[in-house]
Image: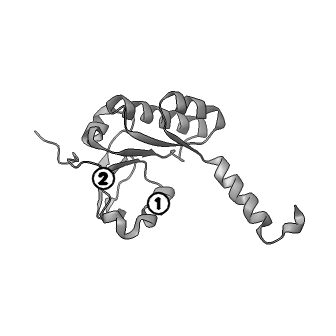
Amino acid sequence: MEDNNTYKGNHHLIIIGWNERVKDLFSYFDESLSRNEMVLIDNTLEETSILPHSIHFIKGDPTDPQTFSKANIQHATGILITAELNQEEEEADISSILSLVASKGTNPSIYSVVEILTSKHVINARHAGADQIIQRSLPISRLMYDKLFERNPSIR
């Protein structure tokens, strides 16, 4: 029996986790969202009507290789793994790294971007095969610095 939730497309982007950052990311795509096929995997989202119509949603465990098979990861071009903010930072990083391992185990050549919350797990994400790492604390700190001195350079 075939699962209705299985994605059959090719050359798509897989996004792990539904949160405000992903919602903002979708807003950057605007009209190109319909041209870029995307699969969202999340195990907490209950109401899918809030998602853009062009997003294919799979409810599932993002550390389970079966979930990635449903997302047709073998034919995906990239994966974005976001940190679960409802977990402690350490636990969120471990979950992100496990998702990375599961995805790379299913498709070793997939381009991967992983959000890591703590600096100590950056090296572990690299060892697990992350192509790019977004260390959340660094850009926010830089943005705070830039905003602090943007209008008042005399306080430097």
Label 1: few (<14), some or many (≥20) within 10 Å? few
User: Which residue type carries mark 2?
Assistant: Phe
Which is in the foreground here, disc 1 or disc 2? 1
What residue lies at 39% left-to-right and 32% top-to-bottom?
104
**Residue 148: % across, % down:** 78, 64
**Residue 63: % across, % down:** 39, 34
Nearest to N terminus: mark 1 or mark 2: 1
Q: Which mark is residue 25?
A: 1
In the figure, 132 relative to 121: above or below? Answer: below
- Residue 27: image quadrant is bottom left
Label 2: few (<14), some or many (≥20) within 10 Å? many
**Residue 24: % across, % down:** 48, 62
User: Which residue type carries mark 1?
Assistant: Leu
Residue at the extreme bottom = 151
In the figure, 123 relative to 133: above or below? Answer: above
What residue lies at 30% left-to-right and 52% top-to-bottom?
57
Would you say 107 lies left or right of 92 here?
left
Note whether residue 52 is visible.
no
Note whether residue 74 is visible.
yes
In the figure, 115 relative to 27: above or below? Answer: above
**Residue 32: % across, % down:** 36, 66
Gap between marks 1 and 2, in whole Å?
A: 16 Å
- Residue 151: image quadrant is bottom right
Give the residue pinned by disc 2: 57
Which quarter shows the C terminus?
bottom right
What residue lies at 50% left-to-right and 59% top-to-bottom?
20
Would you say 156 lies left or right of 80 here?
right
Classify mark 2: helix, strand or loop: strand
The one nearer the camera, 109 or 42, is: 109
The one nearer the camera, 50 or 127, is: 127
